[in-house]
Image: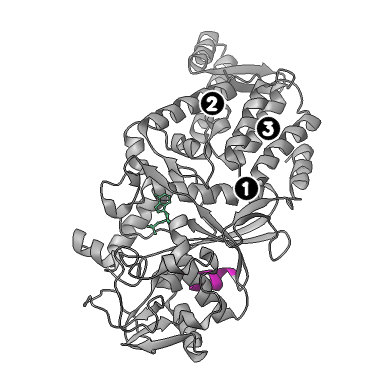
């Protein structure tokens, strides 16, 4: 790494002006992690009973931007995500059928086969839009011991009770169970929401299951021994358990889509803080939904539109990422093919502009810092990706700025955008590079054998492919033209 970039890295490491909307306080707050310079970040992972639709992927793009922004600002980020492969019922509460069991019946496969298949499909699409895999990815079924340990303590401390064979969390034991939903208790009453059935085993209808040993659906495929009999965990305890196990007792950021606020994250706060005996997570990060023309996209609606389907239709998956970056993560976004066509065209043009930058001059560090500060300021303002993209356009348009500085700025911004702006345009993939080096060797040999016709034909063959050879006193190099 050259000294200039080492210096920029040090400059970026400040990062104490980041402001983020916190669902818990309902305002944009200055971000201060529990431990200076380090961020513990948890993302609710997918329920792997079907393909992830582009709405789910929009949510993970939002998380990816936050992750990359924090790293750009110099934080040491440890991020964890679960894979829900058991316990998520067709309602987000305790009614309906386990989504994994339903998929097993639908596809005549075991629940684990279903989970393996859709986990792989999920990561294929996740990586296609350049989302970075979190450091820790853990399936819910790999952490049963942790949930049992937590539930035992919650029962011992009378936050939880056994009824009708299941274990429930007693929400009346908390001063403010509805803290995350702005105390809107009346809107959360069970029965008021579609698809939620009353459960006679519960002391209060808002209590939620931590462990099921009996339920109306028999022959549940995934069962584990527990002090309360053979059964399986509720969905909410998974994320508390996995987060505390891998990221510790103090979490900086916990995120998901807005539909996760209630009941999922509300229940996570209840059981985690009851278990730990102290406040748990400071910042709650929620992404708004992607809608289609008929409303919210959902896996259960069928006809799932995935990133791979978009790719099959000839779109670059990064055009979808680009489309998401054009709108704020806390705004709903309506998907349409017209909007995606527009995003694809604009991205192509942008890449072309980057490709046409003539790389001349030295990087002007004062100007680099100036633009970089503008870029950072937009991201620090609750991740204003649309405005940070405008800074990139300003860089491109600036006639006073030399090519070398432009390119370094764009390379740097693309660490967060991750739109392959520079990779597509100016760098050479390893296969192409070995091909060019091989041709340079062949040409050198031809020249040594005084076969100048062959040497020239190799040079012309490369020019036809957009590769220009440059002979110097130290040997031959190349550039892409
Ligand atoms: P699921 O696989 O259903 O558990 O959902 C995975 C993540 O996607 C959750 O954090 C949801 O909040 C989020 N999500 C679900 N539907 C949408 C949507 N239409 N737009 C954006 N995010 C969504
Ligand atoms: Zn979760």
For label 3, the SS is helix
Q: Residue at x 52, y 55 (%)?
A: 286
Q: Which residue is mark 3?
A: 409
- 85 lies left or right of 288: left
Q: Quadrant of the C terminus?
A: top right
Q: Residue sitting at 33 percent across and 60 percent down?
A: 116
Q: Earlier in the sequence, mark 3 or mark 1?
A: 1
Q: Label 1 belongs to which residue? A: 382
* Residue at mark 3 to residue at mark 2: CA–CA distance: 14 Å
Question: Per the image, is 242 magenta?
Answer: yes
- Mark number displayed over residue 467: none
Main SS category, magenta section: helix
Is residue 434 magenta-colored? no
Q: Coloring scheme of the render?
A: one colour
Q: Residue at x 76, y 50 (%)?
A: 14
Report helix, strand or loop for mark 2.
helix
Locate ligand 1 by image quadrant: bottom left
From the image, state whether disc 1 or disc 2 is nearer to you: 1
Image quarter of residue 212: bottom left
Q: Position of residue 294 (x, y in %)?
A: 31, 43
Q: Give the Cα separation between the discs numbered 1 and 2.
A: 26 Å
Mark 3 and mark 1: Cα distance apart in space:
21 Å
- Picture layout, residue 370 above or below residue 222: above
Q: Quadrant of residue 179?
A: bottom right
| Residue 335 at x, y percent in the picture | 39, 38
Residue 351 — which label? 2
For the residue labelled by badge 1, is the local secondary structure a helix, a strand or a loop?
loop
Q: Residue at x 53, y 22 (%)?
A: 352
Q: Is residue 138 visible?
A: no
Q: Which residues are magenta?
A: 239-247
- In the displayed image of the protein, which residue is found farthest to the right? 366
């Amino acid at each position: 790494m050259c000294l200039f970039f080492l210096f920029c890295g040090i400059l970026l490491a400040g990062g104490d002006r980041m402001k983020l909307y916190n669902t818990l306080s309902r305002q944009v707050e200055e971000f201060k992690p529990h431990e200076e310079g380090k961020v513990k970040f948890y993302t609710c992972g997918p329920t792997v009973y079907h393909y992830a639709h582009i709405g789910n992927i929009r949510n993970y793009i939002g998380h990816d931007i936050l992750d990359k922004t924090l790293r750009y600002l110099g934080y040491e980020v440890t991020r964890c995500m679960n894979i829900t492969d058991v316990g998520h019922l067709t309602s987000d509460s305790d009614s309906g059928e386990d989504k994994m069991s339903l998929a097993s019946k639908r596809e005549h496969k075991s629940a684990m086969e279903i989970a393996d298949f859709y986990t792989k499909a999920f990561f294929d699409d996740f990586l296609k839009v350049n989302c970075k895999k979190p450091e820790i990815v853990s399936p819910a079924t790999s952490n049963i011991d942790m949930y049992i340990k937590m539930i035992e303590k919650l029962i011992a401390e009378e936050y939880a009770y056994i009824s009708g064979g299941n274990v429930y969390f007693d929400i009346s034991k908390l001063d403010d169970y509805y803290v995350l939903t702005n105390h809107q208790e009346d809107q959360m009453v069970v029965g008021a929401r579609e698809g939620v059935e009353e459960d006679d085993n519960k002391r209060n209808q808002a209590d939620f299951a931590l462990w099921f040993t009996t339920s109306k659906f028999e022959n549940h495929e995934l069962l584990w021994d527990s002090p309360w009999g053979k059964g399986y965990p509720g969905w909410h305890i998974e994320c508390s358990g996995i987060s505390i196990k891998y990221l510790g007792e103090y979490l900086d950021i916990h995120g998901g889509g807005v539909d996760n606020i209630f009941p999922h994250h509300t229940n996570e706060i209840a059981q985690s803080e009851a278990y730990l005996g102290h406040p748990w997570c400071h910042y709650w990060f929620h992404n708004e939904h992607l809608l289609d023309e008929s409303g919210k996209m959902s896996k259960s609606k069928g006809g799932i539109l995935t990133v791979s389907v978009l790719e099959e239709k000839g779109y670059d998956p990064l055009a979808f990422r680009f489309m998401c970056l054009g709108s704020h993560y806390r705004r709903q976004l309506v998907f349409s093919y017209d909007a995606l066509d527009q995003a694809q065209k604009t991205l192509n043009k942008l890449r072309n502009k980057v490709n046409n930058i003539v790389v001349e001059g030295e990087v002007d560090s004062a100007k680099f810092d100036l633009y970089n500060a503008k870029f950072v300021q937009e991201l620090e303002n609750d991740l204003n990706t649309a405005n940070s993209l405008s800074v990139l356009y300003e860089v491109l348009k600036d006639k006073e700025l030399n090519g070398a500085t432009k390119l370094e700025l764009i390379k740097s911004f693309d660490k967060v955008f991750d739109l392959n702006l520079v990779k597509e345009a100016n760098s050479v993939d390893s296969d192409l590079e070995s091909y060019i080096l091989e041709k340079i060797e062949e040409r050198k040999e031809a020249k040594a054998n005084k076969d100048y016709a062959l040497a020239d034909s190799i040079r012309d063959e490369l020019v036809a492919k957009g590769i220009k050879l440059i002979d110097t006193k130290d040997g031959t190099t190349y550039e892409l033209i």
